[in-house]
Image (cartoon, coloured by chain):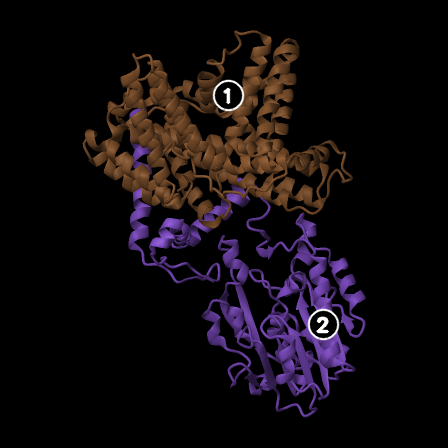
Amino acid sequence: MLFSSISFIYYFLPIVLMLYFLVPFKFKNFVLLISSLFFYFYGEPIYSILMLISILSGYLHGLWIYRSRKSRYAKIPLICSVVFSIGILLYFKYADFLIENINWIFGIKINSLKVVLPIGISFYTFQILSYTIDVYRGNAKVQTNFFNFAAYVTLFPQLIAGPIVRYTTVEQQLSNRKHSVEDFACGVNRFIVGLSKKVLIANTLGELGNIFSNLVDSTILFYWIGAVSFMLQIYYDFSGYSDMAIGLGRIFGFHFLENFNYPYISKSISEFWRRWHISLGSWFRDYVYIPMGGNRAGALKWIRNVFTVWFLTGLWHGANWNFIIWGLYFGILLIIEKFLLNDLLRKLPPAAGHIYTLFFAAISFIIFNTNNITECIVYIKGMLGILDIPFSNAETYYYLRSYGFTLIIAAVGSTPLVTETVRKIKLNKNGEAFLNISEPVVLVSLLLLIIGYLIDGSFNPFLYFRF
Amino acid sequence: MRNNIKNIAVSLSFIIVIFGFMAANIMMPDKEFSYGERRRLISIPDFSSDKLLNGDLSDEYEKYILDQFVFRDTFRGLKAFGKYYLFNQKDNNNIYIINGIIEKMEYKLNEKSVLNAAEKLNEIYEKYLWGKNAGYAIIPDKGYYMAAQNGYLTIDYDRLTEIMNSNIPNMKYIDLFNSLSIDDYYKTDIHWRQERIIKIADLLLNEFGNDKKASDNEYIEHKLYPFHGSYYGQAALKPKPDVMYYLTNKTIENAVVFDYQSNVSGKVYKADLFGGIDPYDVFLSGANALITVYNEDCKNNKELLLFRDSFGSSIAPLFLEGYSKVTLIDLRYISTDLLENYIDFSQEQDVLFLYNVQILNNSSMLK
C-alpha cells in the first residue's frame, strides 16, 4: 500500500487512527502491529511470512545475545543474527545478480532463480541488524515483549521505504510515549507536506522523465532538463516519503530522526552525504565504517574503508552494476575531496562549491537512473553536446515551457528559502497569526488537490520501493 | 489564533476530511458509467484466494477505489485547475483549452501509420474499385488551425499529405485544409459542425462531377443543447457546452437508413441518442460498420461509397441530393475482405475515402 494512495489516506488511515486512539495504551502497539501487518500484506501477501520470520529471528537473537553477553561466546549469537539477516537479504535481493555475474565470468549457464524482491526488505533487515548489534554493544536494552519488537520492525510509517529507524531511537517510545494535539497537528502538517511533495512535484517531474524517455528526437537541452528533473524528482519522491513517515510517526507519538536536510544546498559531496538519506549514511558509518577503523588507521586503510562503505551503499540500493558504480563514484569523489579539493573549495566562493556539488550529484543520478553503463555514457555525451543532436527543438521548448514552473518550484523548495521565510514571518506577531489561520486552510486545500491528482493520474510509483 | 487553537484546527480539519470521505465513499452507491470520461467505471472486484495471495486483488481494489471515489469529476476538475493555473502547465493529459476551444494534442506524426493507411486505401482500390471515380480527403483536426499559433505541438501536416499523395497513385486527392476553419468545429468535441460543412459537401460533390449542390437546398436547423462533446469530460473544467444543430429537409426526412449488422431500417437522425454517452450518435446512430442511406427522391441511380470515420456521419446526409444511395463503410468495425459479401462493386459508384488526421496517424485500427 502506498502512502500516496486513496486506499491508504481515505480507508486505512482513518480506521487505524480510530482503533489506535480508542484502545488503552497497553493495546496501542498491538493495534499498530496488526495494522502494519495488514499494510504490508495488502501489497506483498506472500512475503509477509518472510518478514515475520525475520522479525522472529531478530527477536530471538536479541534474547540470545542478551543472555550470552557476559560469556566468552557472546559473539556467536551476534554472528548468527548477522548471517541470518544478511543471508536472507543476499538470497532475496542478490542471488540472481550473483548468478548472472558468475555466468558471465566463467562462461557457464546456471539458471536464474527468478526471485522477486520483497518490498522493503533492505529497510527492515537493516533495522533488525541495528537492534541486535546495539543489544550486543550494550547500547540498547533487549526487548522481551515480542509484540513491541514486532511493532518496531513493522511500524507501517517506515516499513517499506524508510527512513531506517534504529531501535535506540524509539526504544523508550515503544513502551512509554505521549500523545498530544500538538504532535498530532505537527504530524498531519508533515504528512500533507510530504504527500504534496510526492504527488504534486515528484509525480509531475516523473511525467516529464517519461516524456524524455520516449523522445525520438532528443536535444542537448532536453538531456539537461532530464538530468535536473530526475535529480529533483528523486529528492521530492524520497524526502516526501520520509516526511510522510516522520509525520505519521509523530501522529502516533513516535519521534523519528530526520532523513534529509536540504542536500542540494551542499558545497561539497561529503556535505551532500551528510544531508542526503541521513539514516542510511549514519547506519553504514556506525555499523561498518567505524568498526573497520574509520579514518584513524592511516590513509590506505581509510581509502579501503571508504571504498568498502560506498561499495556496500551502492549495492544496498540494488542488485545491479550501475548502483555499485554509483556508490564507488561517490567513494572516489570523497577521496578526491579529502586529498585535493577540500582546501580549494574553502578558498573559492560558495557558488563554486554549490555548482561543483550539483553537477556531480546530477551525474550520479544519471548513473543511478540508467540501466547500464553504455546508456549512461550516451546520456552524459548528450548533455555535453558530443552526440550529433541539435541544441533544442520545438518539442524541447514546449515541454520546458509546460514543466518550467514546476521545475522552478521544485528547485526553490529544495532550499531552506521557504522554511526561512516562514520562520521570519512568525517572528512578527501579525505574521504568526496569519500563518496560524492559513495553515489549516492550506493543508486541507492541498489534501483536496491531491485527491484530484491521485484520481486522474496514473504515474505514482515510489522510486525507493525497489530497495 | 494561538498555536494550540491552530493545532486543534489542523487536527480536526484533517480528521473531518479523511473520515468524511471514507464515510461518503462507503455510503454512496457505485456508479456504472463516467459520462465525463465516456467509459464504464470499474465495479467492485470479485474475491478469490488466488487473487488475494498473488496481489491481484489489491491492485483491482486500488483501481476500483479510484474509479468510484465520490465527486470524481469534481476532483478531476480540481486536478486540471492545478495543472493549468497553479503549475502553469500547458496541457493536462494532452488536453489544452484556448478561448474555450478544447483540443487534444496529436503529436507526433507517425509516418509508418500514415503509410499503412495509404496502403490500406490502395489495397481496397485494387481489390474492389479499379476504374471507379475514386478520391480521398483528409479532415484536419482543430490543432491545424490553432496549435502552432499558441505554442502547442502538432503533427507535420505537410508531411502527412505528402506521404498520402505520393503513395496513392490511382485516386485523386481533395484538399479540405484550406476550406475549413476553426469555427467549423465544435468547441468541446473533436467533430465538425454539420451546419458549417455544407460548403465541404458542395466541394466534394463537385470533385466527383456531381451536378447537385448541397447548398442549393434549404434546411431546417434543429437545435440540441447542451452538447457536451468528447473533450468536455476530458478537459474536466466544465467549459461552456456547445449547441448542436442537425439539418433536415424533405429529402433527408424521407431517406431510409439500412444497418447491415442489425438488418434494421431507420431514419437519418436519432435525436433521442443526444442524451446518451456520445451525443454525436444523433447522426446516423453513431458508430456502425456498414449502413446504406436510400434516397428514393433521387432518380439518378448513382451510389456513393463513403469509407469514413465518425466525421462521415454528419456529412453523409448532405450528399443525399446527389445520390440515390450513400453507403457508409467504417473499416474500424468491418474487415476489408468482408465487404464483397455486402456491397455489389460491379455497380456504377463514386468512392470517397474521408478520414480525419487522428485515424491516419493511428491507422492500425483500420481492418
Q: Crowding near pointer 1: few (<14 within 10 Å), some, many (20+)?
A: many
Give the x, y percent position of residue B296. 61, 91
Describe the element under mark 1 as helix, strand or loop: helix
User: Which chain is in brown here?
Assistant: A
Q: Is A451 located above or below residue A312 in the figure?
A: below
Q: Amino acid at mark 2?
A: Leu
**Residue at position x 20%, y 36% in the image:** A22
**Residue at position x 63%, y 91% in the image:** B297
Front residue of A90/A236: it is: A90
Identify the residue position indicated by label 1 in the image: A275
Q: Amino acid at mark 1?
A: Arg
Residue A161 seen in the current view: no
- Tell me the chain of label 2: B
Q: Is B329 located above or below residue B363 in the figure?
A: below
Q: CA distance from mark 2 to mark 1?
A: 62 Å
Give the x, y percent position of residue B58. 38, 49
Q: Is residue A9 left or right of residue A271?
A: left
- Tell me the chain of label 1: A
User: Which chain is in purple here?
Assistant: B
| Farthest residue, direction bottom | B299
Q: What is the quadrant of residue B284 in the picture?
A: bottom right
- Say which mark, if any, is on residue B121: 2
